[in-house]
Amino acid sequence: MSRPLVALVGRPNVGKSTLFNRLVGRRAAIVEDVPGVTRDRNYGDFSWDGYELSAVDTGGFEPAGRAAAAGWDRALMQRVQEQAQLAVDEASAVVLVVDGREGLTAVDRALADLLRRSGKPLFVAANKVDSEVGRGRAPLAEFYDLGFGDVHAVSAEHGRGVDELLEAVVAALGVGRAPPEAGGDEGEEGEEGTAAEGEAGSGVRLAIVGLRQTRFVVSEVPGTTRDSIDSVLEHRGRRFVITDTAGIRRKRSIAQRIEQFSVIRAMRAIDDADVVAVVLDAAEAGAEQDARLLGLVEEKGRALVLVVNKWDLAAKEGATQAWYTRELRKKLPFVAWAPMLFVSARDGIGVDRVLAEADRLAKQYRVRLPTPELNALLEAIQEEHPAPLARGRPVKLYYIAQVSAAPPTFVLQCSRPEAITDSYRRFVENRFRDAFRLRVPLRFVFRERKRRERPPRPARRGRGRA
């Protein structure tokens, strides 16, 4: 399910990006002490106290006079305001970020009036209050005039007051904590199953996303997809819920206001999906934007199929599928496990194969593998290619069990997990992927086996008391 989305909105230079980075735990937004640096929406998932949330950092709202003084043109100012408005429309809650040291401004008031119309839970974060002394000096009382309830004094730079703000947000949203991963204790055996088995009753949730794409499966009319639209269809006895998005457009290609509003919806579609079909343009696949989008799908752990569209045109230029596959794998090695299909959406060539592949991947995505087979393979791997020595000492792989599905997640008990190199981790993952013919993301967690988890040694024969 989609995470609740919290939109951070405010005039420029109040610290929205710093607060965003504090929430998502990485410097994902460009932070400068210059008004108007963040001009596009920036998104990130984060966990707090057992709750799973998303945040969106928006460009600042700026009245025309100050925008002109800052060197913005009118079109850019309008786009920034539209980006922020869309974030508010899509959000579950909105945090108005203000400068707690500067006090309430006319722009803050105007923005608060706009936000009230959204009908969403609203919060005020008075930023740049770095200490109790600063809190006493800050004109916080002014912000209560906005009528949003409590004013949360925070320091995004130092993390002060952020927990209290999030506590208020989740209380207002009424969201529950995320359930623990299926499988329980890391030593438990997973539910028995094979790669051909899965949960068939719920159907397949398929998200179709990509750059500059039109509706792909549900409609063949170019340019008709502007929102993420759920459609239900039956294909070969299988039920599909298809979310077909407008695609995440390259910045230079954004020409119409309506086309700017697809990114959040595409991200939410990925959140809800079992399988994501990322549609690539055969003429320019593997570009930086493609890599970012595919990285997002991989990070969220969704099954993935690469759909190379307009293949009819590429084939006319002499391209072969084998050559193209090799070249694309070089550009996108981190999703080399994902199957690749070559289609022409305009002519309807190969579209049925997308649904068939999604069905196959959905079953693998939910698979439960038999623990005895997992451990037999683990033993074979150690005999074939032992883990590299760590400071002259061997690293042992003792036991593996699947602890959850969607995506398949395994805990591997070993000695000295910190000494296992990334290359050996990839080797182990690839061996399991090949052995069980899995083309979906896999998660491996290497953990040190504690003494209490070691099985008792069998008694030696011939020794012991009479």
Image (tube, grey):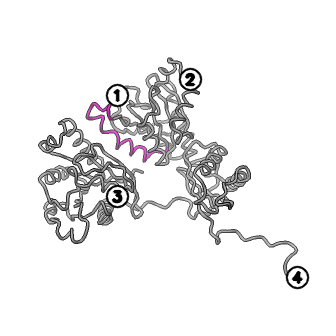
Give residue 158's position: percent from left, percent from top: 31, 63
First reached walking from the N terminus: tag 2 or tag 4: 2
Give the numbered dot on residue 365.
none
Q: Position of residue 407 (x, y in %)?
A: 53, 50
**Residue that appears at 35% across and 42% down:** 265
Name the amino acid type tagged 4: Ala
Return the residue at label 1.
Answer: 223
Above or below 78: residue 153? below
Report the residue at 21% width, 49% height from top.
12
Q: Report the disc number at residue 466.
A: 4
Disc nearest the viewer among 2 and 4: 2
- Give x and y (percent) for residue 182: 54, 59
Mark 1 is on which residue type? Answer: Gly
Q: Is residue 444 above or below residue 154?
A: above
Query: Mark 3, mark 1: which one is toward the viewer?
Result: 3
Q: Which quadrant, please, contains the C terminus?
A: bottom right
The reply to whether residue 165 is in sight is: yes
Residue on which disc 3 sits: 22
Q: Amino acid at mark 3?
A: Arg
10 Å neighbourhood of mark 2: few (<14), some, or many (≥20)? few
Residue range corresponding to the magenta coloring: 251-274
Main SS category, magenta section: helix
Q: Is residue 273 magenta?
A: yes
Determine the secondary structure under disc 4.
loop
Cα distance in 3D space between marks 1 and 4? 87 Å
Whole-number angstrom distance, CA of label 4 to CA of label 3: 68 Å
**Label 2 vs label 1: CA separation?**
28 Å
Q: Secondary structure at mark 1?
A: loop
Looking at the picture, which amino acid does disc 2 mark? Thr
Q: Which residue is mark 2?
A: 320
Mark 1 is surrounded, within 10 Å at the Cα level, by few (under 14), some (14 to 19) or many (20 or more) other residues, namely few
